[in-house]
Amino acid sequence: MIHLDTSFLIRALVRSSAEDLKLRSWLKAKTQVGMSSIAWAEFLCGPVEISAVDLAARIIQDRPPFVDEDAAMAAQLFNLSGRRRGSLIDCMIAAVALRVGASLATTNPEDFRRLEPAGLQVVAG
C-alpha cells in the first residue's frame, strides 16, 4: 500500500508529470493507493479547482481518518525528530501511514526522511 502526500497528489494531477506516470503505473499494477484524511484536508485547502477535487476523489478513495492512536504517534514523531516548527502536519500524515502499513509517496522526501527511523518508508516522487 502507498499513501500519497499532498505534494505528490498535486503533481500527479498534472498530465504526463513524473508523479502522474508513477501513479498510473501503481494503479495499473493494482497497488493499493490512499492518503490520510490529514493530507486530503491539506489538498482541499488549495487553491484547487473542483474538477481536480472530483478527479482526485475518484482516484483516492481510501482516506483513513486521524485517530487517537495517530495523535500519540504524531506527537512521538514530532518530539523524536527535533520538534521542528511547521513539521507537525508531516508527523500526522506519517503517523497514519505507519498505522495502516503504507509507504509514503512525496515530492518532499527530506521532510519525511527524518521519520524513517520510526519505520516510515519514503517513496520519492
Image: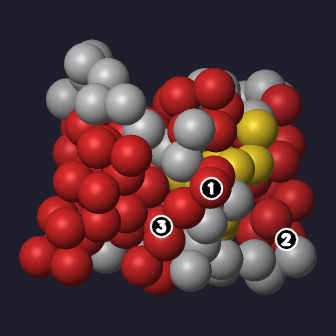
Q: Rounded to the nearest whole Å, what is the CA distance between mark 2 and mark 1?
A: 31 Å
Name the residue rendered at 85%, 71% in the picture. 28
Name the residue rendered at 54%, 48% in the picture. 115
- Work out whether residue 22 or residue 59 is closer to the camera in this orientation and state it: 22
Q: Rounded to the nearest whole Å, what is the CA distance between mark 3 and mark 1?
A: 14 Å
Q: Taking 105 as reference, is 124 left or right?
A: right
Image spot of residue 46 (x, y percent) = 26, 24
The C terminus sits in image quarter: top right
Q: Which residue is mark 1?
A: 117
Image spot of residue 123 (x, y percent) = 75, 48
Q: Taking 108 as reference, is 73 left or right?
A: left
Image spot of residue 69 (x, y percent) = 21, 78
Q: Rounded to the nearest whole Å, what is the CA distance between mark 2 and mark 3?
A: 22 Å
Question: Is residue 47 shown to the viewer in this render?
Answer: yes
Which residue in the rendered view is the most extreme toward the left?
Answer: 68
From this view, report whether residue 100 is shown above or below residue 117: below
What SS does tag 3 mark?
A: helix
Name the residue rendered at 76%, 38% in the picture. 124
Q: Taking 18 as reference, is 13 left or right?
A: left
Q: Taking 113 as reference, is 125 left or right?
A: right
Q: Identify the amino acid type marked 1.
A: Pro
Q: Which residue is mark 3?
A: 97
Q: Nearer the viewer, mark 2 or mark 1?
A: 1
Name the residue rendered at 62%, 55% in the picture. 117
Task: Give the mark, 2 or 3, whose residue is nearer the N terminus.
Answer: 2
Q: Identify the amino acid type marked 3.
A: Ala
